[in-house]
Image (cartoon, rainbow, N blue to C red):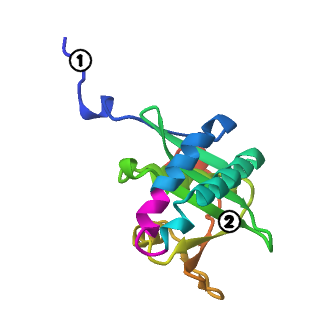
Amino acid sequence: MRRNRGRASRVPRTMIRNATPADLDAVVRTHAEARATYYRGHIPDEQFDSPEAHARSRAAWETAIARGGVLCAEHGGALAGVAAFRKREQGEGMTLTQLHVAPAHWRRGIGTALHDACVSRWRTAGVTHARLEVFERNLRARAFYAAHGWLPHPLTPSAGNHVVLTLAVPAATEEMYSGDSR
Protein backbone atom coordinates (compact mmCIF):
# COMPACT_ATOMS: atom_id res chain seq x y z
CA MET A 1 0.00 0.00 0.00
CA ARG A 2 1.42 3.35 -1.02
CA ARG A 3 1.28 6.31 1.30
CA ASN A 4 0.13 9.69 0.12
CA ARG A 5 3.35 11.56 -0.52
CA GLY A 6 1.71 14.48 -2.24
CA ARG A 7 2.72 18.08 -1.80
CA ALA A 8 0.07 18.78 0.85
CA SER A 9 1.73 16.41 3.30
CA ARG A 10 5.08 18.26 3.04
CA VAL A 11 3.90 21.87 3.16
CA PRO A 12 4.57 23.38 6.60
CA ARG A 13 1.50 24.77 8.28
CA THR A 14 1.33 28.39 9.44
CA MET A 15 0.12 28.84 13.00
CA ILE A 16 -0.97 32.23 14.33
CA ARG A 17 -0.72 32.74 18.08
CA ASN A 18 -0.35 35.46 20.70
CA ALA A 19 3.21 36.63 21.26
CA THR A 20 4.85 35.93 24.61
CA PRO A 21 7.88 37.52 26.26
CA ALA A 22 9.90 34.48 25.12
CA ASP A 23 9.31 35.60 21.51
CA LEU A 24 10.94 39.01 21.97
CA ASP A 25 14.33 38.23 20.37
CA ALA A 26 12.77 36.54 17.32
CA VAL A 27 10.19 39.34 16.93
CA VAL A 28 12.88 42.04 17.04
CA ARG A 29 15.03 40.10 14.54
CA THR A 30 12.08 39.63 12.15
CA HIS A 31 11.18 43.31 12.41
CA ALA A 32 14.78 44.39 11.71
CA GLU A 33 15.13 42.08 8.69
CA ALA A 34 11.86 43.23 7.16
CA ARG A 35 12.49 46.94 7.76
CA ALA A 36 15.92 46.78 6.15
CA THR A 37 14.34 45.58 2.90
CA TYR A 38 12.21 48.66 2.46
CA TYR A 39 14.16 51.41 4.24
CA ARG A 40 17.67 50.68 2.95
CA GLY A 41 18.59 53.17 0.24
CA HIS A 42 15.69 55.47 1.10
CA ILE A 43 16.53 56.76 4.57
CA PRO A 44 19.85 56.84 6.45
CA ASP A 45 20.75 53.39 7.84
CA GLU A 46 21.31 54.76 11.35
CA GLN A 47 17.58 55.54 11.55
CA PHE A 48 16.69 51.84 11.37
CA ASP A 49 19.92 49.80 11.60
CA SER A 50 21.99 51.11 14.49
CA PRO A 51 22.40 50.03 18.12
CA GLU A 52 20.14 52.92 19.17
CA ALA A 53 17.46 52.02 16.62
CA HIS A 54 17.56 48.37 17.67
CA ALA A 55 17.28 49.32 21.36
CA ARG A 56 14.24 51.52 20.62
CA SER A 57 12.67 48.72 18.60
CA ARG A 58 13.30 46.16 21.32
CA ALA A 59 11.77 48.41 24.00
CA ALA A 60 8.71 49.12 21.83
CA TRP A 61 8.14 45.43 21.09
CA GLU A 62 8.60 44.52 24.75
CA THR A 63 5.91 47.04 25.68
CA ALA A 64 3.59 45.88 22.90
CA ILE A 65 3.92 42.22 23.85
CA ALA A 66 3.25 43.04 27.51
CA ARG A 67 0.03 44.93 26.68
CA GLY A 68 -1.24 42.25 24.27
CA GLY A 69 -2.25 42.77 20.67
CA VAL A 70 0.86 41.15 19.16
CA LEU A 71 0.45 38.07 17.01
CA CYS A 72 3.20 35.74 15.82
CA ALA A 73 3.13 33.54 12.75
CA GLU A 74 5.04 30.29 13.03
CA HIS A 75 5.83 28.48 9.81
CA GLY A 76 7.66 25.19 9.86
CA GLY A 77 8.35 25.63 13.59
CA ALA A 78 10.06 29.03 13.25
CA LEU A 79 8.79 32.55 13.80
CA ALA A 80 8.13 33.85 10.29
CA GLY A 81 6.06 36.97 10.86
CA VAL A 82 4.60 39.33 13.42
CA ALA A 83 1.73 41.82 13.62
CA ALA A 84 0.84 44.35 16.29
CA PHE A 85 -2.27 46.44 16.81
CA ARG A 86 -3.83 48.66 19.44
CA LYS A 87 -6.91 50.76 20.01
CA ARG A 88 -6.68 54.18 18.42
CA GLU A 89 -5.57 56.89 20.82
CA GLN A 90 -7.95 59.37 19.21
CA GLY A 91 -11.37 58.19 18.15
CA GLU A 92 -12.69 54.72 17.66
CA GLY A 93 -11.19 51.81 15.83
CA MET A 94 -7.88 50.02 15.72
CA THR A 95 -4.41 50.88 14.47
CA LEU A 96 -2.35 48.19 12.81
CA THR A 97 1.05 49.39 14.03
CA GLN A 98 3.21 46.63 12.55
CA LEU A 99 2.92 43.73 10.13
CA HIS A 100 6.20 42.13 9.08
CA VAL A 101 7.12 38.84 7.45
CA ALA A 102 10.73 37.67 7.45
CA PRO A 103 12.02 38.00 3.87
CA ALA A 104 12.93 34.29 3.79
CA HIS A 105 9.21 33.54 4.24
CA TRP A 106 7.71 35.94 1.68
CA ARG A 107 5.09 34.66 -0.79
CA ARG A 108 3.85 31.83 1.44
CA GLY A 109 0.60 33.41 2.65
CA ILE A 110 2.02 34.34 6.05
CA GLY A 111 1.21 38.05 5.74
CA THR A 112 -2.33 37.21 4.70
CA ALA A 113 -2.70 34.79 7.63
CA LEU A 114 -1.51 37.48 10.06
CA HIS A 115 -3.75 40.10 8.47
CA ASP A 116 -6.78 37.81 8.58
CA ALA A 117 -6.12 36.98 12.24
CA CYS A 118 -5.96 40.69 13.11
CA VAL A 119 -9.20 41.44 11.25
CA SER A 120 -10.88 38.48 12.93
CA ARG A 121 -9.92 39.76 16.37
CA TRP A 122 -11.09 43.25 15.52
CA ARG A 123 -14.40 41.92 14.22
CA THR A 124 -14.90 39.88 17.40
CA ALA A 125 -14.23 43.02 19.47
CA GLY A 126 -16.83 44.96 17.48
CA VAL A 127 -14.29 47.17 15.70
CA THR A 128 -15.68 48.66 12.50
CA HIS A 129 -12.61 50.37 11.06
CA ALA A 130 -8.83 50.32 11.28
CA ARG A 131 -5.96 52.55 10.28
CA LEU A 132 -2.29 52.06 9.40
CA GLU A 133 0.68 53.98 8.05
CA VAL A 134 2.98 52.41 5.45
CA PHE A 135 6.30 53.78 4.18
CA GLU A 136 5.50 55.47 0.86
CA ARG A 137 8.31 53.65 -0.98
CA ASN A 138 7.34 50.22 0.33
CA LEU A 139 5.47 49.27 -2.82
CA ARG A 140 5.26 45.58 -1.84
CA ALA A 141 3.38 46.43 1.36
CA ARG A 142 1.19 49.00 -0.35
CA ALA A 143 0.12 46.42 -2.93
CA PHE A 144 -0.51 43.87 -0.15
CA TYR A 145 -2.76 46.26 1.76
CA ALA A 146 -4.63 47.34 -1.38
CA ALA A 147 -5.30 43.67 -2.17
CA HIS A 148 -6.75 43.28 1.34
CA GLY A 149 -9.18 46.20 1.04
CA TRP A 150 -7.21 49.08 2.58
CA LEU A 151 -7.87 52.48 1.00
CA PRO A 152 -6.18 55.89 1.32
CA HIS A 153 -7.51 57.83 4.29
CA PRO A 154 -9.96 60.39 2.86
CA LEU A 155 -8.92 63.28 5.15
CA THR A 156 -5.24 62.60 5.89
CA PRO A 157 -3.79 60.49 3.07
CA SER A 158 -0.20 60.97 4.26
CA ALA A 159 1.88 61.51 7.38
CA GLY A 160 5.44 62.54 6.58
CA ASN A 161 6.94 59.85 4.34
CA HIS A 162 4.12 57.39 5.09
CA VAL A 163 0.81 56.77 3.36
CA VAL A 164 -2.20 56.55 5.68
CA LEU A 165 -4.67 53.77 4.86
CA THR A 166 -8.01 52.75 6.35
CA LEU A 167 -9.98 49.53 6.35
CA ALA A 168 -13.68 49.07 6.89
CA VAL A 169 -13.68 45.91 9.01
CA PRO A 170 -16.26 43.59 7.50
CA ALA A 171 -19.05 42.62 9.86
CA ALA A 172 -19.31 39.02 10.90
CA THR A 173 -21.74 37.02 8.81
CA GLU A 174 -23.57 33.86 9.67
CA GLU A 175 -21.49 31.95 7.10
CA MET A 176 -18.34 32.82 9.05
CA TYR A 177 -19.67 30.97 12.03
CA SER A 178 -21.44 28.11 10.36
CA GLY A 179 -18.69 27.18 7.94
CA ASP A 180 -21.10 27.57 5.01
CA SER A 181 -19.11 28.96 2.09
CA ARG A 182 -21.72 28.95 -0.67
For the residues labelled 1 and 2, say whether their Cβ atoms are less than 8 Å apart. no
User: Where is residue 159 drawn, in percent x and y?
Assistant: 62, 82
Q: Quadrant of residue 16?
A: top right
Q: Residue drawn 23% across and 25% down?
A: 5
Q: Give the residue number, with chain letter if any, for mark 2.
A: 95
For label 1, the SS is loop
Q: Is residue 83 visible?
A: yes
Q: What is the C-alpha distance between the residues marked 1 and 2?
A: 47 Å
State the residue lying farthest toward the bottom.
155
Q: Nearer the viewer, residue 7 or 71?
A: 71
Q: Classify 147 as above or below 55.
A: below
State left or right for residue 169 relative to residue 150.
right
Residue situated furthest left in the rendering: 2
Residue 42 forms part of the magenta stretch: yes
**Can residue 173 be seen at all in this image of the molecule?**
no
Q: Residues within 10 Å of mark 2 (few under 14, many from 20)?
A: some
Q: Residue at x 60, y 60 (%)?
A: 53
The quadrant of the rendering that contains the N terminus is top left
Q: In the image, 125: left or right of 58?
A: right
Q: Give amino acid for label 1.
A: Arg
Q: Which residue is mark 1?
A: 3
Q: Is residue 5 left or right of residue 182?
A: left
Q: Is residue 157 left or right of residue 12?
A: right
Main secondary structure along the magenta-highlighted residues:
helix
Up-down relation of residue 142 to residue 16 (above or below): below
Q: Residues within 10 Å of mark 1 (few under 14, many from 20)?
A: few
In the image, the segment drawn in magenta is: 34-43
Dot in front, 1 or 2: 2
The residue nearer to you, when weighing 125 against 79, is 79
Write the residue at 74% across / 55% down. 125
The picture quadrant where one finds residue 141 is bottom left
* Viewer-proximal residue among 47 and 1: 47
